[in-house]
Image (cartoon, rainbow, N blue to C red):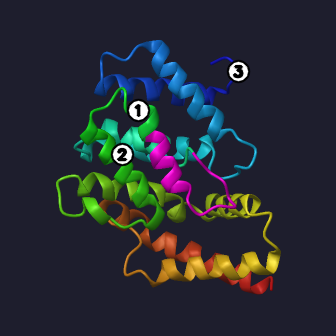
Amino acid sequence: MNDFSPIDAELGNRFTLHLFAINTDVTSAQAKTLWLDIAARYNETQRAYHSLRHIQQLFVQFDKINHKLSEPHLIALALYYHDVIYNPTRSDNELKSAAYAIDQLKCYLNEEQCQTIHALIMMTASHQLAELADNDKSSDAAYLLDMDLSILGASWSEYEQYAHAVRQEYAHIPAMDYRAGRITVLERLLAHAQLYLTKYYYERLEMQARENIAREIRFLRASE
């Protein structure tokens, strides 16, 4: 892993540990091959937000709540793969990421585990619990979705960097069209009764997230 940064190395070590916790028959070489592929994809040039720094930020959150998860290692693998395929010009990234994850992991996980990871990744498209809502995996799924949206409740300086990075990824869209589309997305978020599904994240981030979103909307409108 010498070709990658310290962030990559840390995340690579984590990946190996989580995969090995699920399947002790996985070799170091197999885990390294899987990880190097993940790292290369998250380091693609079209990514400004959906990069390894996003994954690192998610694992900062993961370390805070992993004791609340019934299957933390599966959640960790879903985090690694949830944006593994990312093309800002397409709307099927979650579908492609879910399919890619299963193709990569099917030799190491059982069918139920693969189905769970597929469902978890697909839920990041809508941030609704969907098919896992009525079973014992719903709590884990809710934490995963809240971790993915945790950036919304970060400090304004962090949120501002996130918003700027998202704009960079959509640089191919004219400014006027981007503003209109982004405002629509943000207003839909504010229309939700609550942004966060778990009590943990709701209590800690809900108010700040709504303030950040409203502030970005005001900024976008002022720049019209």
Sooner in the amino-acid sequence: mark 1 or mark 2: 1
Amino acid at circle 3: Asp
26 or 148, which lies in front? 26
Mark 2 — residue?
Answer: 117
Amino acid at circle 1: Leu
The magenta-colored residue range is 85-101
- The CA span between labels 1 and 2 is 10 Å
Q: Residue at x 82, y 74 (%)?
A: 174
Q: Does the magenta portion include 30?
A: no
Please identify the quarter of the rendering in which residue 213 is found: bottom right
Q: Which mark is residue 105?
A: 1
Q: Which mark is residue 125?
A: none
Sooner in the amino-acid sequence: mark 1 or mark 3: 3
Q: Does the magenta portion include 97?
A: yes
Image-based side of 105 in relation to 57, left or right: left
59 or 110, which lies in front? 110
Q: Position of residue 68 (x, y in %)?
A: 25, 47
| Dot 3: element | loop
Image-based side of 93 in relation to 27, left or right: right
Q: How many marks?
A: 3
Q: Quadrant of the N terminus?
A: top right
144 or 59, which lies in front? 144
Mark 3 — residue?
Answer: 3
Q: Residues within 10 Å of mark 3 (few under 14, many from 20)?
A: few
Whether label 1 touches label 2, CB < 8 Å: yes
Q: Residue at x 63, y 78 (%)?
A: 215
